[in-house]
Amino acid sequence: MEKIKKEEFEKWEIIKDLVDQLIDLMLNYRQSGHPGGSRSKVHLTVSTLLSGFARYDIREPEKPFNDRIILVAGHTIPLIYAVLSVFNEAMRLRYQETKDEKYLPKSKEKTLYPEDLLGFRRRGGLPGHAEMGGKTLLLKFNTGPSGHGSAAAVGEAIALKRLGADGVKVIAIEGDAGLTPGVTHEVLNSSWSLGLDNLFYLIDWNNFGIDDHPLKETVYGTPETWFSSHGWRVVGTEEGMKWETVAETVEKLFTDVKKNIPNAAWFKTRKGRDYLKYDNKSHGSPHKMNSEVFWETKKPFQDKYGVKFVGFGEPAPGTYDEIMKQFKKNIDVVMSVLKENKELYRYISDRLVEIGESVPDDL
């Protein structure tokens, strides 16, 4: 893959805006879920998935030699739902435009589209935590409780090594507070002792978990010391919400690999970025449905893109059916920004096809 170009950052910024809004809408109309960590991980996730350093085929998530992506912070699954919605909608729009089958998924039933967000945390719909199944087969383990996804990441990295598939990476995305369980220390030590240079951690360092006090008051050190003290190679940035520094860090993470040394990157962020509810207050606590502060988070998007959310500034509808109808209309409002930006959806779709075709059929 070519080195990341600075002009891509303008497109990533729009993608970030779309993802933010979809996260908020899901949680607003379901009144459940985790806004803080979902929003704080957008920059590092979008950069990783579009940089070309992560090799995966969004059209065929079961392809044998896709990189293994594990959302260790499984409670931040709204992030992945929103990202997949934008990516897959771009592919759908491009197919409608060109009729070129290279933009089609192998299985429509296993592809997550914006309309699927209506089923967030509802029976038969999208689960409240990450699952390797259904429409999120891109993820390679069921995660949720702190820590257990880390052990799975090590297991998958070991298996790939034993298989001789060293070129397939295990990419683990986690928050800082999620590193506090004891299993993490076993993971860090085992990864070094087993020489897992195919394991890559991306850490959202926002300094908060669920408690009122910041993490630094109860956990000594920084991601640099947490990982390097176990022999890991560590890179990071104090500006984890700026595209240029995030992209530089992602590039360093995946290109400066040392034989038999596991890899980690940290990104300093703000939990609840731009949600107007920050730090631990944004953990598992969305704004009240259609509250004044919720609509306040929608105003910048409206002003920036010249759109208007249905029911803006008004209380929540009175019935379930009316709530779901407004939910759907407002998803459409967000996605209209993508639909009307041909340059953007052409960029996303071509990039995803390019990345997908970089996945080897054999090793």
Image (cartoon, helix red, strand yellow):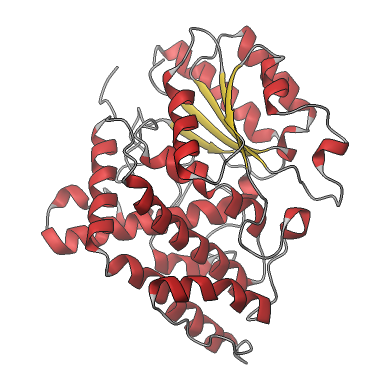
Residue at (45% x, 52% y) in the render: 134
Residue at position x 52%, y 20% from top? 157
Residue 60's place in the image compared with 251, above or below, is below
- Residue 140 in view (yes/no): no
Q: Which residue is drawn at 63% across and 81% down?
A: 290
Q: Position of residue 106 (x, y in %)?
A: 26, 48
Q: Judge by depth and name the residue closer to the eye, 170 or 268.
A: 268
Screen quadrant of the C terminus: top left
Is 99 left, or right, of 16 in this rendering? Answer: left
Q: In this view, does 193 lie above or below 212?
A: above
> Residue 299's x, y, as percent?
53, 76
Quick check: 25 above or below 192?
A: below
Q: Position of residue 264 (x, y in %)?
A: 58, 25
In terms of depth relative to the viewer, which is nearer, 214 or 6?
6
- Position of 306 with respect to 24 (left or right) is left
Q: Which image quarter is the N terminus in?
A: top left
- Residue sitting nearer the eye, 244 or 322: 244
Q: How many numbered markers are drawn?
A: 0
* Outermost residue, left side: 99
Residue situated in front as seen by the camera: 344 or 210 = 344
Picture quadrant where residue 60 is located: top left
Res. 179 image quadrant: top right
Judge from the rendering whether residue 100 lies leftward or rightward of residue 41; answer left or right: left
Q: Can you see residue 32? A: yes
Asked if 164 appears above or below 224 in the picture, the reply is: above
Residue 79 position, x and y percent, is: 53, 53
